[in-house]
Image (cartoon, rainbow, N blue to C red):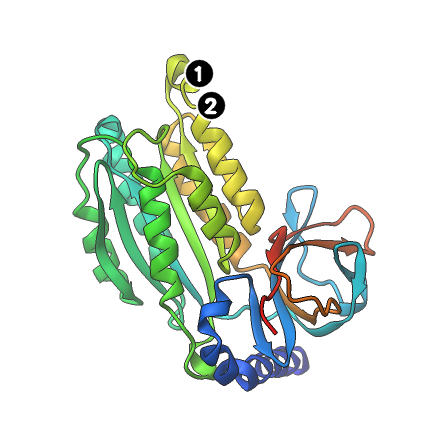
Amino acid sequence: MTLRLASLARGKRLVALLAAVVASATLVAAQQGQGGRIRSGVELVSLNVTVSDGGKYVTDLTEQEFEIFEDGARQKLTFFSRTQLPISLALLLDTSASMDERMGIAQEAAIGFARQLHKEDQAQVIDFDSQVRILQSFTNDAATLEKAIRQTTPNGSTSLYNAIYISLKELKKVRATGASDIRRQAIVLLSDGDDTSSLIEFEEVLDLAKRSETAIYAIGLRAGEIARREFKEAEFVLKQLANETGGRAYFVNDARELSKIYQTIWDELSSQYSVAYSSGNPKRDGAWRRIQVRLLRPNATARTKQGYYGPTGS
């Protein structure tokens, strides 16, 4: 009971900390696009950190075991919690013609993932082939999400970049207006091949992703030796998007593995630490700032977004 009360207290501290700056964050919404920060006189950099050891998630670290560096300079944590905030996530499903034989399995795997949402969480469903469609806007209703996922039918080419770009833009609209609205953000993406029809270039998508507060989890579905050889560009793209945003990329050759991968992603989202620090860098030059998380526990490794763009203006 004592541990549970302590956990609840940490969660309330996080909400209180972030709620105190929600109003100022709303006033500088245009500058929010330049990194994962909420402005309140100083730059508050918030991070969701995944810690693992030998493939297992580590969830019992203390604040004293974390060291945060920005461009090599040690930063002082202003907040630390093992309590996860609610999440807003976009479920992206590749429905190009090449998904025809595997669409049913992919649907069931995505539905299983959607059913694990907590009551405070919300998700939207987006599918993409030659076009990008928002099949369901943000909701917590599992049945509604399932209905949207079952609507997907394979057809056309692959507009992967367009889909990610639109998803990032949609998540950017999910702004906190009060303490109860503060959420983490993630994209969970399934695709089976290279982009073939997007109007948006990859560099533009990557830049938008780095300026967002959204972690991208990508699942690359390959099938057969020819498909593996032709998947090189998609593999590079998915890995880079995941690495830059603190997510992760997975690659499988059999659609029957999808349920396990979705479960792994959910387990990670349920095992993250929330930390924040006030940047000691006073410059307002809009430059990229590299973030590094070091852990004092042997064999434990941390993963979070690789950095953010600093503020601009006076």
Relative height, residue 254 to residue 204 (above, below):
above
Say which residue appears at 37% left-offset and 32% top-offset.
256
Tag 2 residue: 232
Say which residue appears at 19% left-offset and 47% top-offset.
150
Whole-percent x, y for residue 298 in the image: 83, 49
> Which quadrant would residue 15 be assigned to in this image?
bottom right
Q: Amino acid at mark 2?
A: Lys
Quadrant, the C terminus: bottom right
Label 1 SS: helix
Query: Badge 2, how many Cα within 10 Å: few under 14, some, many 20+?
Result: few
What distance separates the C-alpha of mark 2 from that of mark 1?
A: 6 Å
Whole-percent x, y for residue 88 in the image: 40, 64
Label 2 SS: helix
Query: Badge 1, how many Cα within 10 Å: few under 14, some, many 20+?
Result: few
Whole-percent x, y for residue 278 in the image: 70, 72
The reply to whether residue 252 is visible in this rendering is no
Observer-nearest of 145 and 278:
278
Relative height, residue 239 to residue 273 (above, below):
above
Tag 1 residue: 229
Side of 110 relative to 152 (left or right): right
Q: Amino acid at mark 1?
A: Arg
User: Furthest residue to the top?
Assistant: 226
CB atoms of marks 2 and 1 within 8 Å: yes
User: Furthest residue to the front?
Assistant: 314
